Image (cartoon, helix red, strand yellow):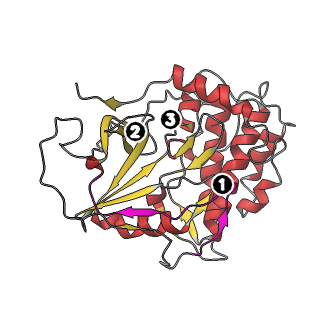
Amino acid sequence: MSSAPVKHSMSSSPKNSLGPRVGDKRKASPTPEPARKVVRGGPRDFGLAQILESTDIAQPLVTRHESPCDTFREVFCCDLAGPVSMVVYRSRPSRVMAIRTFTQNRTDQMLEIFRNIQHENILSAIECYKDGETVYFRFDDFPVTLEHLVACDAYPTETQLALILSQLLQGLSHLLKCGLAHQSLICSNILLSWSGILKIAGLEHCIEHLPGQSQAPMMNALATIAMELMQNYDKDDGLRGIDDVNRWPVESWPFKFLEATTTAVSVEQLKHHIHGPAGTDGKGELQWLARFALVSARTFYTYKT
């Protein structure tokens, strides 16, 4: 097998923004009427199964009928699984958070997803802000994607690869249980926290998936992700394989996992081909890799002076 490494570049420049007020000097606004802020707790049934499989306690998505500009100040924009505004509280800023913006044609879909799906390996929203026809979701800060790992000089060990792939399969399995399939399962849509927790993002690319429906597109996507992690590039024309058999011998489980993506028909079947820490056990192994990837990688950003 032969293939030349492909130079990786990060995603296109982000266009997400909270609007012209963010980062600018604020003009005095009339005192809002008491009924302006409406906070609604508790998930509503939008048709998705409410299956909670998280080690964290799932909290109902809080919805506020106001602009996030009233509460947060945008400090910069970047591309992390899509355009995102990095913000701090206007009053007493103590930590950085992320806000993602969706316009009218996506609002119902995203509200349905974030209100009904909670899993440790799927990105979940903390708050929702509805302002006119635009909906904003606030998230914790996840500064690294698998694309950063692919672009850096360090290759994951077998243990690190097992931690990444097992978490990815757990998240995908939960999406399937909820009747969803991810149509854009790529490295740039998979986030990684400082603590080694993986989060599937880009949930706006999810579509309905019925029981018994083919999972072949996910097998193809998982093969590409595995190849990129193992050798920093995939193969042309849909071929699957590893060129450096010194790093990944043919008898190693990662090599056999890649082979299994050609015969497995489901995410559940692929789980049996991962040998190493399960889920987030030993996730500390990913902590230094996440930090090194962010230090050594470049990404696009915008910053208002």
Kindly state the secondary structure of the residue where label 1 is placed.
loop
Residue bearing the label numbered 1: 56
Q: Earlier in the sequence, mark 2 or mark 1?
A: 1
Q: Are marks 2 and 1 in contact (CB under 8 Å)?
A: no
In the image, residue 27 lies in the stretch drawn in magenta: no
Are discs 1 and 3 less than 8 Å apart at CB? no
The location of residue 24, given as percent across then percent down, is 18, 35
14 in relation to 7, above or below: below
Q: Which residue is mark 2?
A: 79
Task: Locate the C terminus by quadrant.
Answer: top left
Out of 292 and 111, give the one closest to the viewer. Answer: 111
- Residue drawn where x is 48% and y is 54% of the image: 126
Is residue 214 in sight in this rendering? no
88 vs 230, nearest the viewer: 88
Residue 166: give its label.
Answer: none
**Principal secondary structure, stretch drawn in magenta:** loop
Could you say whether the residue bearing mark 3 is in a helix, strand or loop? loop
Provide residue 172's location: percent of width, then percent of height: 64, 58
Where is mark 3, residue-wise? 143
**Around disc 3, counting alpha carbons within 10 Å, would you say few (fewer than 14), some (14 to 19), or many (20 or more)?**
some
**Circle nearer the N terminus (1, 3):** 1
Residue 78 as seen in the image, left or right of residue 247: left
Gap between marks 2 and 3 measured at Cα: 10 Å
Residue plotted at (65% across, 39% down): 227
Q: Residue 277, percent across and down? A: 82, 42
- The stretch in magenta equals 49-67
- Label 3 sits on what residue type? Pro
Q: Please tell me which residue is depicted at 70% across the width and 40% down the height of the picture.
A: 241
Of badges 1 and 3, nearer the viewer stands 1
Q: Earlier in the sequence, mark 2 or mark 3?
A: 2
Residue 285 at least partly seen: yes
Amino acid marked by disc 2: Asp
